[in-house]
Amino acid sequence: MATILITGCGSGFGKLSAVELARRGHRVFASCRTLAAADQLGAETAGRDGIVPLALDVTDQASVDAAMRRIGDAAGAIDVLVNNAGIARLGALEDLDADALRGVMETNFFGALRVTRAVLAGMRTQGEGRIIMVSSLSALVGLPGEGIYAASKAALEAAAESLRYEVDRFGIHVSVVEPGAFDTAMPAKLAAGDAVPAASPYRPLLSYLTARAQRQLGTGDDPQRVATLIADIAETDEPGFRYAAGRQAEQVVQRLRALDESARADFIRGVNDTQWWSAGADRPE
Ligand SMILES: NC(=O)c1ccc[n+]([C@@H]2O[C@H](COP(=O)([O-])OP(=O)(O)OC[C@H]3O[C@@H](n4cnc5c(N)ncnc54)[C@H](OP(=O)(O)O)[C@@H]3O)[C@@H](O)[C@H]2O)c1
């Protein structure tokens, strides 16, 4: 039985993953952005073993610190962290104001990094751990109207890849899940659209994208598929690094990927000759 922390469990993949991992016998700290959402999750999962709802806003250091103290007191070190919390904004990079741009980065990138940094010392001390980043197909393909979301997920994946080679020596595995289109609350939030400035030259593009997103509501994959994948990665002996999830992601990734994952790992470790670090060997002369 592992001790698992998942962020963003108020809905979608987070909530489903918490239920799936608890069903498999793990102790899941299912964190939600607000206390109200945590209470709601507690009411919905009452009587189910293994789920401990708690409040954790990934953009708020004090909230992360409080959640870590609570988990530390109750269970000690965390074995698996699932960085799932995320938000999306549809909008042209020129139109979105600075707060909107920063807000996406604060949640999707700095938020995930904040929680990750908070669990690493415990994982290093126990000599094992798993960090699963819920990224997006958008990290690989920057679509118009999704620039800041794509940038936040690409930043998350870039950091995850570096982290992987920093912490492998300590027995910590880092994985990235790249869902395509899934029927959670997120596509509906996107399809609701952001207010586009009246004078925006991008209005036709944004109204087209919003209408298209509305038409496509309900046509995504079943989000349980991602919850099952996350639980499988949490449990497998040797997790891989990148996992495409769903029909859309699998098709696109197949086309995009020039190098397979093991060739890429060998290549990256070779660039700065750091194979010795990952192998747990002493620094060469
Ligand atoms: N659905 C898809 O097709 C799709 C595709 C690719 C990637 N993803 C990624 O999958 C992850 C989960 O999304 P989802 O599809 O399950 O959508 P969702 O139902 O909207 O879930 C996102 C969750 O993140 C929470 N959250 C937002 N800001 C937070 C913060 N500051 N601190 C803690 N929690 C926060 C939300 O809580 P509130 O509701 O209280 O704000 C919500 O419960 C996200 O990272 C998303 O980018 C989704």
Image: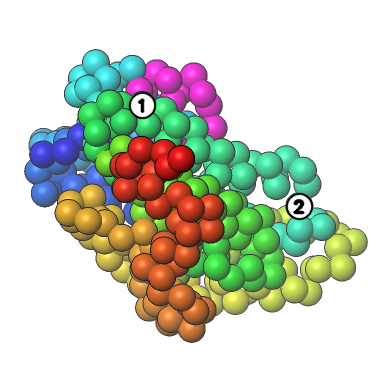
Quarter of the N terminus within the rendering: top left
Eyeballing the image, is 30 above or below 12? above
- The answer to whether one can see residue 274 in this image is yes
The CB of the residue at mark 2 lies under 8 Å from ligand 1: no
- Identify the residue shown where x is 86% and y is 63%: 200
- Identify the residue shown where x is 32% and y is 42%: 281
* Residue 252: x %, y % from top left: 48, 79
Q: Nearer the viewer, residue 241 or 28?
A: 241
Q: Report how far apart the C-alphas of labels 2 and 1 lie in the structure.
A: 37 Å
The residue carrying mark 2 is: 96
The label nearer to you, 2 versus 1, is 1
Pick out the residue farthest to the right: 199
Q: Is residue 191 left or right of residue 56?
A: right
Q: Is residue 152 left or right of residue 130?
A: right
* Residue 35: x %, y % from top left: 39, 27
The CB of the residue at mark 1 lies under 8 Å from ligand 1: no
Classify 10 Å Cα crowding around label 2: few (below 14), some (14-19), many (20 and above).
some
Q: Nearer the viewer, residue 122 or 7?
A: 122
* Residue 25: x %, y % from top left: 9, 43
The residue carrying mark 1 is: 121
Eyeballing the image, is 253 above or below 199? below
- The answer to whether one can see residue 220 in this image is no
Q: Which residues are magenta?
A: 58-68
Q: Is residue 65 magenta?
A: yes
